Amino acid sequence: MQNVVEPAGPCGSTRNWPLDVLARATYDERQEKFALLLEHGIAIPVHRQAEVFAWFPLTTRVVNALIARGIDPTRPTRWDGQAVAPLTAAIGMMRETFPGRPFEFNDDEILAYVRALLAAGAKPGDTEPGGLDAWQALAQTEASLREFQDGMQAQQREAKAALDKADPARRQALGRRMGLQDEETDLSRAALVRQVREALENADAH
């Protein structure tokens, strides 16, 4: 099994490590490959161990594999320029956008990661000096998502007004090019916010 400190191919880029390449895979592929690499003994340098919790949402299998390798899911990681607990980073991933679709990670991926971290012993009140705990992160994320939705709705209204003035024969093509969202799309992710809040409350209650 190739060591993570060795290049994954002929490219000399420092980003060309086996674990970095996972970021280019689909969600299911990266989770399966990440788990297999960990379970088969791939080494992760100490200076990179904390950052793995901020790469993308992880499954319970991957979190447990990291724990089995002695990597603590409650130790601080870097997220949005701050030292935060992995649980805080997981919540922050809710507002990560992606070209061509509203968000980089879907609701199921985020919720599964939050639950995996809580099951592994993460505490909603855990924080780092100058950082946020999970409750503060959720409040900020909820406000940010509402602001995002308001901004997108304003853009949609402007785009649709321009579309109404366009040649009827070109409206469908222009609508696709503008990337108009379905009016029922909830960009505030209210259902996910509620589920994450419930998960945090359940963890605090035990």
Image: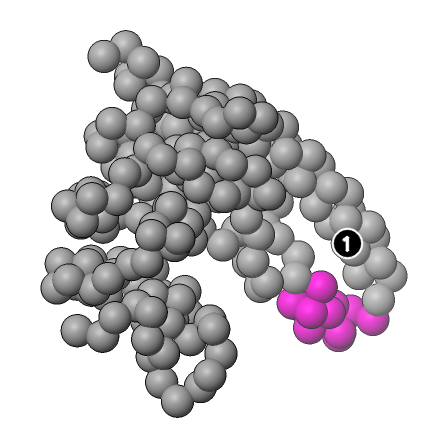
Q: Position of residue 152 (x, y in %)?
A: 70, 45
**For residue 48, above or below residue 11:** above
Question: Could you tell me what secondary structure mostly forms the magenta stretch?
Answer: helix
Q: Residue at x 58, y 43 (%)?
A: 80
Q: Residue at x 36, y 35 (%)?
A: 75
Residue 153 visible in rendering: no
**112 in the magenta segment:** no
Q: Quadrant of residue 120?
A: top left
**Quadrant assignment for the N terminus:** bottom left
Q: In front: 1, or 165?
A: 1
**For residue 169, above or below residue 102:** below
Q: Position of residue 10 (x, y in %)?
A: 39, 89
Q: Viewed as shown, does residue 82 lie left or right of 37?
A: right
Element on which disc 1 rests? helix
Residue range (magenta)? 167-178
Q: Viewed as shown, does residue 159 lie left or right of 68?
A: right
**For residue 44, above or below residue 190:** below
Residue 101 visible in rendering: yes
Q: Viewed as shown, does residue 169 lie left or right of 54?
A: right
Q: In front: 159, or 119?
A: 119
Q: Residue at x 22, y 30 (%)?
A: 119
Q: Amino acid at mark 1?
A: Lys
Residue at the spot of label 1: 160
**For residue 63, above or below residue 175:** above
**Quadrant assignment for the C terminus:** top left
**177 in the magenta segment:** yes
Q: Residue at x 75, y 74 (%)?
A: 169
